[in-house]
Amino acid sequence: MSAQDHALDGHGHDGHGHHDEDIGPHATLGGYLTGFVLSVFLTAIPFWLVMGEVFEKSSTTAIVILLIGAVQIVVHMIFFLHMNAKSEGGWNMLSLMFTLTLVVITLTGSLWVMFHLNSNMMPSMQHKAPAGETGGKIVPPKTQ
């Protein structure tokens, strides 16, 4: 056996216990603290947006909160799950892309179904008078 063979352990590692390519760059106390501070910050912002009524339209607030939520997902994946394009030989990233594709298909399909159910199943809320009486216009129901 050569000196190089003695320097490597049984798995081909140098025996120093460094597995940076497996764990990721943020597997330190500082990395975890950075992730924690970012998570708290990204949780406090939406709370402030809602409680402070920062935007006039609630739809604007909802869009900003969704964007901040997406950023928070990325922070968790990087700082706590240690995911990057190289971890596990790229399989983590491939499984993430597959999962995101399924989530987008599921959410899009669910919204599509709910929209069409709402528009196709809710006509009972409005009574349509006979065509001769109102000229085909929809009139609100009479209260008794």
Image (cartoon, rainbow, N blue to C red):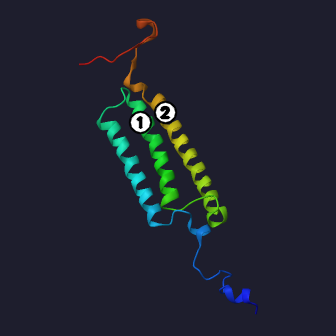
Q: Residue 54: x and y, percent? A: 34, 31
Q: Quadrant of the N terminus?
A: bottom right
Q: Quadrant of the C terminus?
A: top left
Residue located beneath label 2 in the image: 115
Numbered mark located on residue 114 in the image: none
From the viewer's side, name the closer residue of 107 and 45.
Answer: 45
* Residue in view at x 62 percent, y 57 percent: 93
From the viewer's side, name the closer residue of 29 and 44.
Answer: 29
Q: Residue 105: x and y, percent? A: 58, 45
Relative to 99, 7 lies left or right = right
The tally of labels here is 2
The answer to whether residue 141 is above or below residue 23 is: above
Relative to 23, 58 lies left or right = left
* Residue in view at x 73 percent, y 89 percent: 3
Q: Residue furthest right?
A: 2
Q: Amino acid at mark 2?
A: Phe
Q: Amino acid at mark 1?
A: Ala
Q: Quadrant of residue 69?
A: top left
Residue located beneath label 1 in the image: 62
Q: CA distance from mark 2 to mark 1?
A: 19 Å
* Residue in view at x 45 percent, y 31 percent: 118
Sequence-first tag of 2 and 1: 1
* Residue in view at x 41 percent, y 36 percent: 62
Q: Residue 72: x and y, percent? A: 46, 49
